[in-house]
């Protein structure tokens, strides 16, 4: 087998090696099924257990109460931009925190359905930071307040939730889901595309508080109706069985390896510090995009002194087994995505490579 690289891709992203190995060992014949998880009925007892385990692991990691449903919905996080608005914004106004590229997309979809109030915008500052909760201009009686906890492209994180009182709080947590503890009781709805932190692409994990279901209007397409999907426990139609299985294995890995999200967060902080410290000590050779108090532990966006050096950096890193470091085409530069599954050794290797590159090209 060809050697695995350290994969800093923003998503689909690296998965824990022990999970890939377990999935490989079960690929042809899943215990109790005599067939691959890809080949068995989504109504079978074996799959029911796989599905229940994935939900139970997420519930355990987030301390979920009976009040929250865990759904696995297709169409990725982007379909949630629309589904959210179709279910809760018809005829109303929602507040959106305009924090970066993904918030921009979520707002554009919501505007097709209802009125979007920009509660705060970081656009004029090139999205280098997140707002403090008290900077938000919220609408009385808004249908919900939406924020993006981690802007994957700009590499900035909102560490404190907006204070919304009785207004439902909604979060796109695609790129920091299960990377740190969270007070889920504050959230009416939280969604995350699986391919950053919890599995392969093609599914959004949606955590929905029960009281929201009464607000779902009649007549939505069934697959876009949270009430139907919750009533049917994500099994209205054939779900993404294989992805749900891997989400169950990745969340099991977090529980086994780290015990919970406190340890997971400490691990992620230590990893990110390796790279940020190098940036801060480089005398301005590497320049981080994010303001210090908004620095993401998941995506580190940075520049070098010139675009030529950035291209050389990305190419040389790839040759050294550090792949996926090119920044998003919309912001340029470089980006290291170091989600839960990136081992500390990967961040150490990146730090060492960055130091050596600066020495040779400074
Ligand atoms: C990747 C990402 C999305 C889009 O996810 P898809 O599954 O590709 O639709 C949305 N929001 C954030 C914060 C993301 O990182």
Image (cartoon, grey):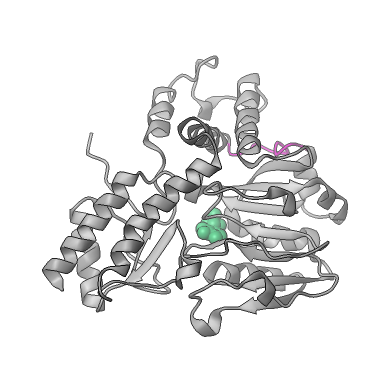
Q: Quadrant location of ligand 1?
A: bottom right
> Is residue 347 toward the left or the right of residue 183 in the image?
left
Question: Residue 92 falls in which quadrant of the image?
Answer: bottom right
Q: What stretch is highlighted in magenta?
A: 232-240
**Residue 179 in magenta?**
no
Instruction: Tell whether 144 sits left or right of 102.
Output: right
**Main SS class of the magenta portion in the image:** loop
Decide which of 86, 194 is in the foreground and name it: 194
Relative image position of residue 167 (x, y in whole percent):
81, 63
Against 164, residue 251 (above or below) is above
- For image coordinates 46% across by 19% down, the residue present is 29
State the residue at coordinates (28%, 71%): 286
- Residue that sits furthest to the left in the current view: 360
Which residue sits at x=79%, y=66%? 89
Question: How far across and down, in percent of the image, does residue 13 sit?
Answer: 42, 49
Residue 200 visible somewhere in the drawing: no
């Amino acid at each position: 087998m060809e050697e695995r690289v350290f994969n800093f891709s923003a998503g689909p992203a690296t998965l824990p090696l022990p999970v890939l190995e377990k999935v490989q060992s079960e690929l042809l014949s899943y215990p109790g099924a005599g067939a691959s998880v890809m080949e068995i009925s989504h109504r079978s007892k074996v799959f029911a257990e796989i599905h229940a385990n994935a939900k139970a692991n997420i519930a355990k990691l987030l301390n979920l109460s009976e009040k929250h449903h865990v759904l696995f919905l297709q169409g990725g996080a982007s379909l949630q931009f629309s589904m959210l608005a179709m279910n809760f914004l018809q005829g109303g106004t929602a507040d959106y925190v305009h924090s970066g590229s993904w918030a921009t997309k979520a707002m554009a979809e919501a505007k097709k359905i209802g009125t979007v109030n920009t509660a705060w915008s970081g656009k004029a500052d090139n999205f280098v930071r997140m707002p403090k909760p008290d900077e938000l201009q919220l609408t009385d009686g808004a249908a919900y307040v939406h924020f993006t906890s981690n802007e994957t492209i700009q590499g900035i994180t909102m560490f404190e939730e907006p204070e919304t009182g009785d207004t439902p709080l909604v979060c796109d947590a695609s790129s920091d889901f299960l990377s740190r503890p969270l007070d889920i009781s504050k959230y009416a709805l939280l969604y995350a595309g699986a391919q950053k932190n919890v599995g392969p692409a093609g599914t959004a994990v949606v955590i929905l508080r029960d009281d929201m279901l009464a607000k779902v209007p009649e007549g939505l397409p069934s697959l876009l109706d949270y009430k139907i999907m919750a009533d049917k426990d994500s099994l209205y139609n054939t779900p993404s069985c294989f992805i749900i299985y891997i989400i169950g294995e990745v969340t099991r890995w977090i529980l086994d390896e780290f015990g919970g999200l406190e340890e997971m967060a400490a691990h992620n902080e230590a990893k990110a510090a390796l790279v940020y410290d190098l940036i801060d000590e480089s005398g301005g050779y590497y320049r981080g995009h994010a303001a210090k108090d908004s620095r993401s532990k998941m995506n580190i966006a940075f520049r070098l002194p010139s675009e030529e050096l950035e291209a050389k950096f990305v190419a040389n890193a790839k040759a050294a087994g550090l792949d996926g470091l090119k920044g998003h085409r919309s912001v340029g530069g470089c980006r290291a995505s170091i989600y839960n599954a990136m081992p500390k050794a990967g961040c150490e290797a990146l730090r060492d490579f960055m130091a050596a590159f600066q020495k040779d090209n400074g």
